[in-house]
Image (cartoon, rainbow, N blue to C red):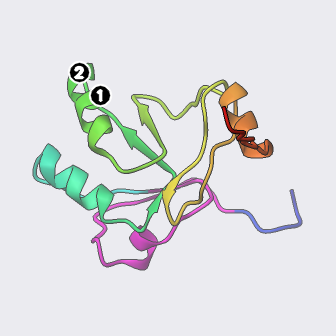
Amino acid sequence: MSTGYYVAPTLIAECRADMTVVQEELFGPVVVAMPFDDDDHAVELANQSPFGLYDYVYSKNVSRGFAVAKRLRTGNVGVNTTQRNHETPFGGFKLSGIGRDGGSFGLDCYSELQSVVWPA
């Protein structure tokens, strides 16, 4: 396309936790990669972010990948995939928003519940 603003898929490697590109929530074909020493360090780095919409964990050991995923403070985690299941709730933690959308669970966001109490 000849008009508009487009960003080519981009990998930004060797980032540091204090870099703007790490601290802000990017919406585009951009992957930010940071080196880490072990699983604990990776989880610590990921959870330092003020945002928590989606994390991705890649591992040859699926059990290890799921163990790391459980420790991430984010609304969604892809283990060895970038796809999401549209029947499951979608939403973030921290500054990435409140509430969930998607699937039947997501309908709660559009509902107003009322409690009516009367003496027995």
- Which image quadrant for residue 11? bottom left
The numbered disc on residue 74 is: none
What residue do we see at 53% from left, 52% from top?
A: 92
Up-down: is 65 above or below 16? above
Tell me where residue 25 appears, x and y as whole percent: 53, 65
| Magenta stretch bounds | 7-31
- Which image quadrant for residue 118? top right
State which quarter of the image contains the C terminus. Answer: top right
Up-down: is 15 above or below 20? above
The numbered disc on residue 63 is: 2
Report how far apart the C-alphas of labels 1 and 2 lie in the structure: 5 Å
Is disc 2 placed on a helix, strand or loop?
Answer: helix
What residue do we see at 55% from left, 60% from top?
A: 96
The reply to whether the magenta stretch includes residue 13 is: yes
Up-down: is 69 above or below 61? below
In the image, 120: left or right of 83?
right
- Which image quadrant for residue 17? bottom left
What residue do we see at 70% from left, 27% from top?
A: 103
